[in-house]
Amino acid sequence: MRKAVALVLILAASGAAAVAAPERERSNTGPSPEAAARNYLLPGKSFRIVGTKVAGRFAVVRFTGALIESETNWSDDLLVERFPFGWQVVDTVRNACLRERGATPAELAKLHVEYMPVRATVQCSEVIDHGRVADVAAVRSMYRAQSLVPTVRVSDDYALLRWWLPGGGERLYARRGTGWKLLTGGGGALMTRDLRGYGVPVANACTLVPPYTADDRAMCRSAAHATPAR
């Protein structure tokens, strides 16, 4: 041990380059709302957390001076939600559909945020979690990369997770025994018919991904006459 310490001192005295400390692993989770936000955000020169407000299982973290994609001074409010595995950064507040996520008027007031539904081209029902709470949490726990995770949709034994900022994409999971297995995932969006190629029954595929094309809508209408998926 003494030899190792002596070697470090000799190298420092001789002007040898120091070994850089490993970069902190970035993720979207943490033991507290602020920790989750700091793990997710890439700090710029003027980065700082302005404030954090907590109400129930929701928290809003206001920040300024972060780096994201081509933006060098990103300032915004992040919605962070508590799950059994910790706090996870979900979305920006303006896109989160907080009321539909279950925030009460009292919680909205405590968070000091004005309710702002998502842009008119997207329904709030498409950007919030869907399915059993335990299943949603289990799937969310499997994706802790440096991305926002606005929604997880679960239908029986299949689940679709959406992520964005930076970039954007989806991950398809299937229940295997007591856990979940990743079937496919990457940038971009999956269409309803794409899920059929991974063995997802039609009814479940139509629940996980709203049909946008005429062919997918026809497929889902036919499936609607059968037992509906959960």
Image (tube, rainbow, N blue to C red):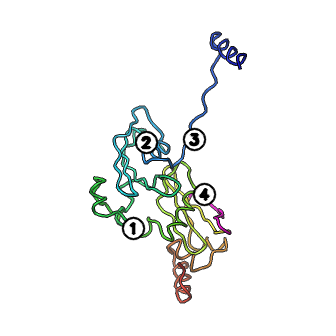
Q: Which residues are magenta?
A: 177-187
- As helix, strand or loop, the secondary structure at mark 4 comes to strand
Instruction: Identify the mark nearer the N-term, 1 or 2.
Output: 2
**Which residue is identified by label 1?**
124
Q: How far apart are the alpha carbons under marks 3 and 4?
A: 20 Å
* Pair 3/1: label in front: 3
Give yes or no for residue 149 being in the magenta stretch.
no
CA gap between label 2 and label 3 equals 21 Å
Whichever of callouts 3 and 4 sits on the residue coming sooner in the sequence is: 3
Q: Mark 3 = which residue?
A: 25
| Figure check: 216 above or below 162 | below
Let me know if residue 181 is in the magenta part: yes
What residue sits right under mark 4 in the picture? Answer: 186
Task: Please count the marks in the image.
Answer: 4
**Residue type for callout 2:** Glu
The one nearer the camera, 178 or 117, is 178
What secondary structure is the magenta-colored segment mainly?
strand
For discs 1 and 4, the disc positioned in front in the rendered view: 1
- Left or right relative to 196: residue 164: left
Q: Give the secondary structure at mark 2.
A: strand
User: Which numbered disc, 2 or 4, marks the residue that appears first in the sequence?
Assistant: 2
Examine the image and state in which quarter residue 100 appears: bottom left
Q: Which is nearer the N-term, disc 3 or disc 1?
A: 3
